[in-house]
Image: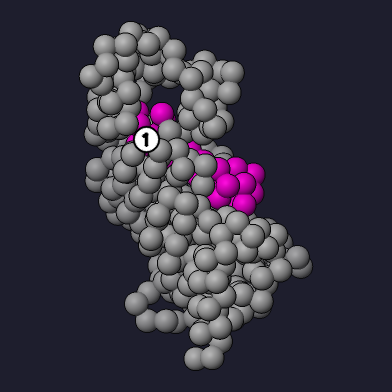
Amino acid sequence: MVSSQTCVDENNFISTIETVYRFKVNYIKTKDLTHGECITSPTFKSEGYKWIICCYPNGSGKHKDKDNIGVFLELRSDYIDLHASFTLSIMDKSGTEAFQRKFNGKFSVESNRGSHCFIRRTILEQGYLSEDGYFQILCSINVMPQIRIGGVKEDISALWENGEMTDVNFEVDGEIISAHRVILAARSPVFRAELFGHMVEAKKIECIKIEDMKPEVFRALLRFIYDNSLDNARDTDQATSVMTQHILAAADRYAVEGLIARCKKYLMNNLSFDTVMDVLTLSEQHNFIKLKEACLEFASRQENFTKVAFTNGYIQMAQVYPSLWEELRKKATHVSTD
């Protein structure tokens, strides 16, 4: 939930806009995560900038301190040295803001600020968990007025959003989506070859049919091409992971390296019993070695494998990718004997 209010100084001049965001965390599920693994909030906006909250239930520092929960605010917009002050709080059982820490500093894209030792687990369990096992993080942000970096990018992105001066159309599952040839060619070698290849006919094509892709996935691909953003938040973590997997496959198909890296990072940081088999299969299909290793590491842990082995994804993988299934089974067996 996001709310905003204007902050006014003593001379009645508007200074900043304060945005307040609530992030509800299922504490019971966080116990399955290991040190360094985090859960992230959906993306939210403050003053037009995109943010997420990262919560590390079993610690995030260099030392494996599982007694403390780490909480950070991370910028997801492509701006340099954005200055913001913010407050992170834990809500008590009555829904009142009770545990509070204040921070102040500069952000750049994907940089974060917060605390590795935000609150001790024992304190959280004693006073801040609801009856159904959830706790709430409250984040209040004040973005300092400044000149934004990257106005050209916003202007180019606006051309696409408004459908102005487009010169190529794509038919995706019966829907027509327009874009600019030169922008696509500049960001993707596959689009470059397709739109400006040696064949003269390619330059005359007005509508290109895209097979095996949903319109929302193709739009997410184009969105990143135009402004480097990844808007994949859904109602549930599993739905967001599924969407990210589709976007990753599309990014690989069109060789958009920045989007590939962003999607892989999200999937690595948000593996779960519901998604790990699908992500593992995807990594095998597209030869994402590090992502595959992360999936195998997660799924082969003794406490995880006993649950993963009963999922439909595990059974389907055994049928479709027997060598991958055998690799996971052997790794799990090796881990259990260590």
Q: Residue furthest right?
A: 131
Above or below: residue 45 compared with residue 24: above
Residue at horizontal 44%, vertical 82%? 65
Residue at horizontal 61%, vertical 74%? 304
Q: Position of residue 224 (x, y in %)?
A: 38, 34
Q: Position of residue 49 (x, y in %)?
A: 40, 38
> Which residue was labeled with disc 1?
254
- Depth order, front residue of 258/205: 205
- Depth order, front residue of 335/55: 335
Q: Quadrant of the N terminus?
A: top right
Magenta-highlighted stretch: main secondary structure?
helix
SS for callout 1 = loop
Q: Report if residue 319 is visible in the image.
A: yes
Q: Amino acid at mark 1?
A: Tyr
Above or below: residue 117 compared with residue 112: below
Above or below: residue 243 compared with residue 272: above
Identify the magenta region: 222-244
